[in-house]
Image: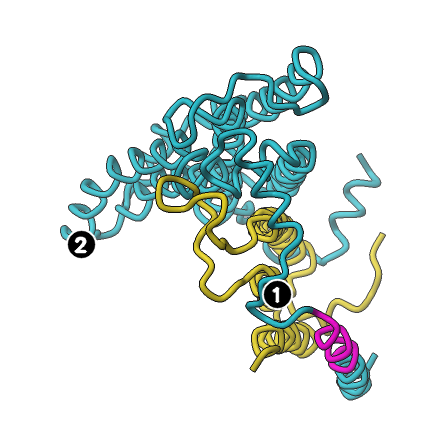
Chain colours: A cyan, B yellow
Amino acid sequence: MSRRARLTLLWIGLAAFGVAMAIAFTGLPGFGGTFHPYRDLAVVATFAHATANGVSSINFDQRGFDTFGEETILFCAVVGVATLLRPVHRERRREVRSGGRVLESTSLLVYILFPLTLVLAADVVTHGAITPGGGFQGGVVLSTGIHLLYVGGRYTLLRRLRPLAWFEQGEALGVVLFGALGLAGAALGSALFANFVPQGQLSDFISAGTVPLFNIAVGMTVCSSVVILLAGFLDQALAIRSDPGTQGDPPDADSKEEAAA
Amino acid sequence: MSYYAYGVAAAVMALGLIGMATSRNLVHTVVCLSVAQSATYILLIAVGFQYGGVAPIFGNQVTQQTPVVDPVVQALTLTDIVVSAAVTSMLLALVIQMAKRRKAVDPDSLSGLEG
């Protein structure tokens, strides 16, 4: 399709989109109103299980099975990226040296922030049921903290502190734990992903039943996923080089070699 | 003013779509897809907003009777963000493969099917 035809089609589509949205929005309850039927039901259910964080209660208690699906999406995406980013033939992995100059202020900041970020991540994950946060957010913070080492110019240190095999197993373990907790709900409670642990007092550290356990399982998966994803992309940028002799190959050389093999 | 926030969501979505259609670089296309997806976050959060509502974290000050903003759409937004991250990483990995195999990242020069 030519560029002009594509743009014409785009404007026709956008006009239709605008009309459809205008019709849809005028049918919605006004912005900021008091009519929130799902909110009312969710708040009652949140209090019934003594969970202080309403969002965590919905994610891990009221619709735990959905969140299991969400976690599986992330797991599958990581598997897909790992498959796409592995070194193909005629590529080799080279040793990365920690070269280059890093500002001393940057190094200092990394040394201060690295332990702080890890503690913050642990706090966000473990208090996911009673304060804002949870497994997803804490997992991302944790993996970001680990990658501060790379910002500080220490790729070799990052590689040593980040044994990828552990994270691959940690990711799988998180998903298995999540599923096992769901099955335990079916075995010991009323239904799949039921909250079968006594829920205790609202806002206590040990409260909300299974929600903190789900948070830890999700935190493991999310942290490991992000670490594996970034490891794949960093590898592509820093460590993987095509063999020097094959730069000028014609584009279809790949398929011929595959056919020969 | 009552529909202003919804209009912002629609505008961000339209910007993302325009960016994708006029893109000259696949990385730019993927980023535009992320922009379009962030319109859905705005819409979801706007739908759940209530004037005077506080965050749905309950405790001594916030009881069952306190008006809070809708936690259901906030949980959906969290799901949305996770899916967006998964899709973006997958697409960027595909772009890297595309750049390796075809030595091009301009969508206009990638019209032929391969297989």
Circle 2: residue type: Leu
Between B25 and A54, the one lying in front of the other is: A54
- The quarter holding residue A239 reads top left
Quadrant of the image containing the C terminus of chain A: top right
Q: Amino acid at mark 1?
A: Leu
Distance (Cα) linking label 1 and label 2? 42 Å
Give coordinates of residue B44: x percent, y percent: 61, 60
Magenta part of the chain: A17-28
Residue B20: percent from left, percent from top? 67, 72
The residue located at (58%, 76%) in the rendering is B8
Instruction: Assign the N terminus of chain A to one quadrant of the image.
Output: bottom right
Residue at (54% x, 23% y) in the render: A210
**Is disc 1 placed on a helix, strand or loop?**
helix
Residue A177, position in %: x, y? 58, 20
Where does label 2 land, which residue?
A: A103
The label shown at residue B43 is 1
A66 or A5, nearer to the observer: A66
Around disc 2, counting alpha carbons within 10 Å, would you say few (fewer than 14), some (14 to 19), or many (20 or more)?
few
Q: Position of residue B42 (x, y in %)?
A: 57, 65
Same chain? Circles 1 and 2: no
Residue A246 visible within the image:
no
User: In the displayed structure, does residue B20 sit left or right of residue B113?
Assistant: left
Q: Which mark is in front, 1 or 2?
A: 1
Write the residue at 24% across / 38% down.
A116
Quadrant hosting residue B30: bottom right
Q: Is residue A132 visible?
A: yes
Give the letter of the chain under mark 1.
B
Please, what secondary structure does the residue beneath circle 2 have? loop
